[in-house]
Image (cartoon, helix red, strand yellow):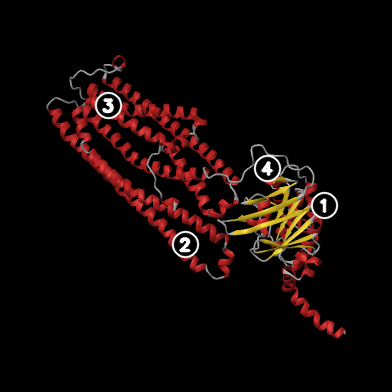
Amino acid sequence: MEEEVLGKAYDGRLMRRLLAYIRPYKSEVLIALVFLLVNAALQVVGPLLTKLAIDRYLEPSGRPTRTILDPYLSSSPWTGLLQISFIYLLSIAAALICDFGEQYLMQWVGQKAMFDLRRELMAHLQRLDIAFYDRNPVGRLVTRLTTDVDALNELFASGLLMILGDLLMLLFVIAAMLQLSPGMTGFMLAVMPLVIVVTIIFRRSVQQSYRRIRVAIARINSYLQEHVNGIAVLQLFNREEKSRAEFDRINRDHMEAFKDAITAYGWFYPVIEFLGMLALALLLGYGGFRIRGGALSLGILVAFFQYGLRFFRPIQDLSEKYNILQSAMAASERVFRLLDTPVEIQSEVRSKPFPPRPAAIEFDHVWFAYKDEDWVLADVSFRIEPGETIAVVGHTGAGKTTLTSLLLRFYEAQRGSIRIGGTDIREFDLEQLRRNFGVVLQDPHLFTGTIAENIRLGTPGISDNQLSESAERVNLLDFIQTLPEGFEQPVRERGAGFSTGQKQLISFARALAHSPRYLILDEATSSVDTETELRIRDALGRLVEGRTSIVIAHRLSTIQRADRILVMHKGKLREIGTHQELLALRGIYWKLYQLQYKDQEFAREPETVSGD
């Protein structure tokens, strides 16, 4: 799985692409950098002020000390201590303001950058062809836009500048300690090999935990997506207990991975704290010896204790930031792989205008396979005249729906061409091509919103009168008028609460409201009851009126009035003609007709005999 790949802790190529998302906000980033630099410098001020207060007023060592504050400090101990305390307070307040400013700005930049990235991902997903979704489960794509983008947000908000801030603080603290006492700085650095070893062990431990966490989250997303969508089947076959057991296993993997990460953090910080205290203990012994010998002042020793606390804190932070950086690099690799997925089906640079008037549709020796040369359509040729209603019938898997998918350019034919008005559809702008088609599918899809929003689908220019007229023409208006809020009645996810027939009628109204020139009905009545089918069949007659229509159906009763019927069998166009012409051929269509109506024929035979 992609989630298992850890990747490098730093990849310059990926980082350059990531930084492009914060380039529009470079002013805010520069201000945050200034705050960061000032804050890092202010961390050095406090111990120096403490040293100055002790060595000048509290425990004068007699050794000359020169600072830039000398001209401004009073010779009186009380006044001098108040002055130093006030300066210390100002430095703390300034550090607080700088810390808040830097955190706020980078959180803001991170959110804006991730907003832009999510928007780009969503736009790219909408352009990708249907074949891409055949290969990639929805749960994985949801993980890209949620978990992976959140990992990148953490990098921007608390990763990049924080790493720089920790490094600056370390440099400033080491420089200040070296200036005060190189010997004591050596004692402080003596524990660094142990700190490095502990950090490496911690990093490897957390690294594996984070990998397992990412894998578990991806599996949870995928499992929930699949089983929530299939909840009806789950309950129908009494699979609840089995499903709970499977989910418990996945959920437990997630919990165990987090437990390992918690354990790693639980021992890492105390160990680093112990090593820090060990270094301070060494300082106390060495510094006390130097003070008794008069080679060191008490103020320097106290300042080193304060620097020691500041020295180990960024080391702890850097260890955690390393894991954030590595997770972000792995996440960016997956996100950019998705963004770099080529859009196979797109408009040409110089597209031809779509025919302004109804034009003929022509399939010319079309071959198509979803994979390799396993042909779903083989050498299919036919022509649909303007205003003609064509029905397509055949067994399941005969290639009926594939015809319309190719016509709408959801897939590209490997051989042959499809033309509208004599122009290959690949030469049209993709948006213009699809805008001229209205489609009603077997499984109508409703979005969360209102009935009016589901009919309009965001298309401007569809007035309330057009909504009512479209609903009335497809026998939907009576139902809408019985609802408490009419067209503004809320629609829940996937149209929950509406019957299949009601959702289908809304789909018919949607197609009619957009006034398409061409209409495709794909098994539009196959999943409704007889009464609803009669209502839809009546609506269907009004819907195809004056339009070039392609009707795909299993129920032959819905297509007997079609101008022509195409009979598909094993990917090939076997028969073509009217209902009566095809029955007279006594071929595939006749057999399909016999299979569907044999019960009715058996029921009529006794009546015929008694009549004779």
Give the label, 4 or 3, closer to the camera.
Answer: 4
Label 4 sits on residue: 427
Packing grade of label 2 (10 A; few <14, some 14-19, many >=20) is some
How far apart marks 4 and 1 lie (CA) works out to: 26 Å
Give the label, 2 or 3, closer to the camera.
Answer: 2
Give the label, 4 or 1, closer to the camera.
Answer: 4
How far apart marks 4 and 3 lie (CA) works out to: 70 Å
Who comes first in sequence, dot 2 or dot 3? 3
Nearer to me, 58 or 206:
206
- The picture places residue 96, in percent across and down from the top left corner, at 40, 31
Kind of residue sitting beneath label 2: Phe
Packing grade of label 1 (10 A; few <14, some 14-19, many >=20) is some
- The picture places residue 238, in percent across and down from the top left corner, at 54, 70
Q: Is residue 110 left or right of residue 465?
A: left
Label 3 sits on residue: 176
Q: Kindly state the secondary structure of the residue where label 2 is placed.
A: helix
Residue 307: image quadrant is top left
